[in-house]
Image (cartoon, rainbow, N blue to C red):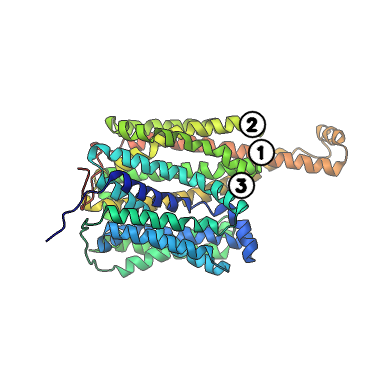
């Protein structure tokens, strides 16, 4: 006698899925501020310790586009439960690592099992909510996506200062076990249609080599001085050749491991383009703000975290309202408002100066939160709206992968542009500062000791150079957001996220 499928509790299942996703997204940033402590304890340089971040990012970037294949093979529920449990296990192994090699290995495995978690969460949430409430589910997921990276450095710094760095990994263990048990209990009896697809070895190997090498280039490019480094040149060539083979093979193979044919859907194509560019610009802001606060304004990492944290206030407060009321409007209009708000806050930052106070920095972050609250849910709904039911997991994984890759490109380009433009502005500012200039001589005489005066003038020029470069970056980012209004209007309604093939409950 077949047991009838019992619809899951939307509340309990949402808690389990959201906790797992929060844990996974949190781990993309929680170790960042702990790297100096980890390096000291394990006896390596801080530069070597950055592989703790890179190994996780590389593995996750590789596994994300494989979500569709893994879903077809194992089913969404099983894949989520095992990914979450393995994430908890590898977190424990990271915490007990006795050498940097061990930590990097376990971080790489952790990143690999983390890849499918976010796309599967998205697909499962859509499957348990009725059509009228799916906007609420995606809004909640968007809130988690925004808040977790903000909380990561603050929580990581606090844990490292008050306890020890292994605890930034140990905290995942109870959360992962609890989340997987809740979802397993609530979704037991659900039958996911599975297949035994032929493994596309050419696609798999070229994906691993191409994406892995590309992620290493993007993460290490600035440290290695880009194409002045033989390592970066060789790795870039390997990545380019592998990705070219991958694209040609996947577009012509009958059973590709990554379904690039999803781009035949108009809304998925333009929605994904908007997601990539908007997230890249958003990631650039999130990266540059704390760096600028610490370098130019002299903030500690903790106070830089407090100054940037207000961005998460409105997404938390408005989640319910965005989820409930946004679907009643044209989602293109909602996304356009989000882009305009984000663009305006970028233009506001392009007028920042070295003496600006904490209040104004935090206020602009708070305003930006409105744009973030209105951004993710409409974009996710739009890009999933014209996919077939059995394409949801694949599409979510592919879009998330490209979004993540866009963030990596953004991080590299933003830091490179900020550094290079700062050097250029420094040179322009000091080109007339010479011993033969009467104004310079008067200023140095007023400061007393000539050597001290010269060092102070050089320091001020450096600060101003970084400030001008910061303003330029945000001016460009403002126009990126404004231009995205045009992109999102290339999509066409209706915008209703479909449930997965094994959806049950809530209908």
Query: Is residue 381 found left or right of 284 in the rendered image?
Result: left
Which numbered disc flags the more N-terminal residue, 3 or 1?
A: 1
- In the rendered structure, find residue 297 and report the number of the disc placed on it: 1
Q: Which residue is mark 3?
A: 419
Circles 1 and 2, Cβ within 8 Å, touching? The answer is yes
- Residue 97, by quadrant, is bottom right
| SS under mark 3 | helix
Q: Residue at x 48, y 38 (%)?
A: 312
Q: Is 425 on the left or on the right of 380, as rendered?
A: right
Q: Earlier in the sequence, mark 2 or mark 3?
A: 2
Point out residue 158 in the picture as x, y percentages from the top left corner.
58, 49
Residue 288 can be seen, yes or no: yes
**Spatial distance from mark 2 to mark 3, Cα to Cα?**
21 Å
Give the secondary structure at mark 2: loop
Rendered residue at 41%/56% (across/down): 176
Q: CA distance from mark 1 to mark 2?
A: 8 Å
Does residue 240 show up?
A: no
Q: Nearer the viewer, mark 3 or mark 1?
A: 1
- In the picture as drawn, the residue positioned furthest to the left comes out as 1
The residue carrying mark 2 is 356
Q: Residues within 10 Å of mark 1 (few under 14, many from 20)?
A: some
- Which tag is nearer the camera, tag 2 or tag 3? 2
Mark 1 and mark 2 lie on one chain; the one further toward the N terminus is: 1
Question: Whole-Å distance between the Cαs marked 3 and 1?
Answer: 16 Å
Camera-side residue of 3 and 32: 3
Q: Position of residue 392 (x, y in %)?
A: 27, 50
**Residue 240 coordinates in the image, percent (x, y):** 43, 61
């Amino acid at each position: 006698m077949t047991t009838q499928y019992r619809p899951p509790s939307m509340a309990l299942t949402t808690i389990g899925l959201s906790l797992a996703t929060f844990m996974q997204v949190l781990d993309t940033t929680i170790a960042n501020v702990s790297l100096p402590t980890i390096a000291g304890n394990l006896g390596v340089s801080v530069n070597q310790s950055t592989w703790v971040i890179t190994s996780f990012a590389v593995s996750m970037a590789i596994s994300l586009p494989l979500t569709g294949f893994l879903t077809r093979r194992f089913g969404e529920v099983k894949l989520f439960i095992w990914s979450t449990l393995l994430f908890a296990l590898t977190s424990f192994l990271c915490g007990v690592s006795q050498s940097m090699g061990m930590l990097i290995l376990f971080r790489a495995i952790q990143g690999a099992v983390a890849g499918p978690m976010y796309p599967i969460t998205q697909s499962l949430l859509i499957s348990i909510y009725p059509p009228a409430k799916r906007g609420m589910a995606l809004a909640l997921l968007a809130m988690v996506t925004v808040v977790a990276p903000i909380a990561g450095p603050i929580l990581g710094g606090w844990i490292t200062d008050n306890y020890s760095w292994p605890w930034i990994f140990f905290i995942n263990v109870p959360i992962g076990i609890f989340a997987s048990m809740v979802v397993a209990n609530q979704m037991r009896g659900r039958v996911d249609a599975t297949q035994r697809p032929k493994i596309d070895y050419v696609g798999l190997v070229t994906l691993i080599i191409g994406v892995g090498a590309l992620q290493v280039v993007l993460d290490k490019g600035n440290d290695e001085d880009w194409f002045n480094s033989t390592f970066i040149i060789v790795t870039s060539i390997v990545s380019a050749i592998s990705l070219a083979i991958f694209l040609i093979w996947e577009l012509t193979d009958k059973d590709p491991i990554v379904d690039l044919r999803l781009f035949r859907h108009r809304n998925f194509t333009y929605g994904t383009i908007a997601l990539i560019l908007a997230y890249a610009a958003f990631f650039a802001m999130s990266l540059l703000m704390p760096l600028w606060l610490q370098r130019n304004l002299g903030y500690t990492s903790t106070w830089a975290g407090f100054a940037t944290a207000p961005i998460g206030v409105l997404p938390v407060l408005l989640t319910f309202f965005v989820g409930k009321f946004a679907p009643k409007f044209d989602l293109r209009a909602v996304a356009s408002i989000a882009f305009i708000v984000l663009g305006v806050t970028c233009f506001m930052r392009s007028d920042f100066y070295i003496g600006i106070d904490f209040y104004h920095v935090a206020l602009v972050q708070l305003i930006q939160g409105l744009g973030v609250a209105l951004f993710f849910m409409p974009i996710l709904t739009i890009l999933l709206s014209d996919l077939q039911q059995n394409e949801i997991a694949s599409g979510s994984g592919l879009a998330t992968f490209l979004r993540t890759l866009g963030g990596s490109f953004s991080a590299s380009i933003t830091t490179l542009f900020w550094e290079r433009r700062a050097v250029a502005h420094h040179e322009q500012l000091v080109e007339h500062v010479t011993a033969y200039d009467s104004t310079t001589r008067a200023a140095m005489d007023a400061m007393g000791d000539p050597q001290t005066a010269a060092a102070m003038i050089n320091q001020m020029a450096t600060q101003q150079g970084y400030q001008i470069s910061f303003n330029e970056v945000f001016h460009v980012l403002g126009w990126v957001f404004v231009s995205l209004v045009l992109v999102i209007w290339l999509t066409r309604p209706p915008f209703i996220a479909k449930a997965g093939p094994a959806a049950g409950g809530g209908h």
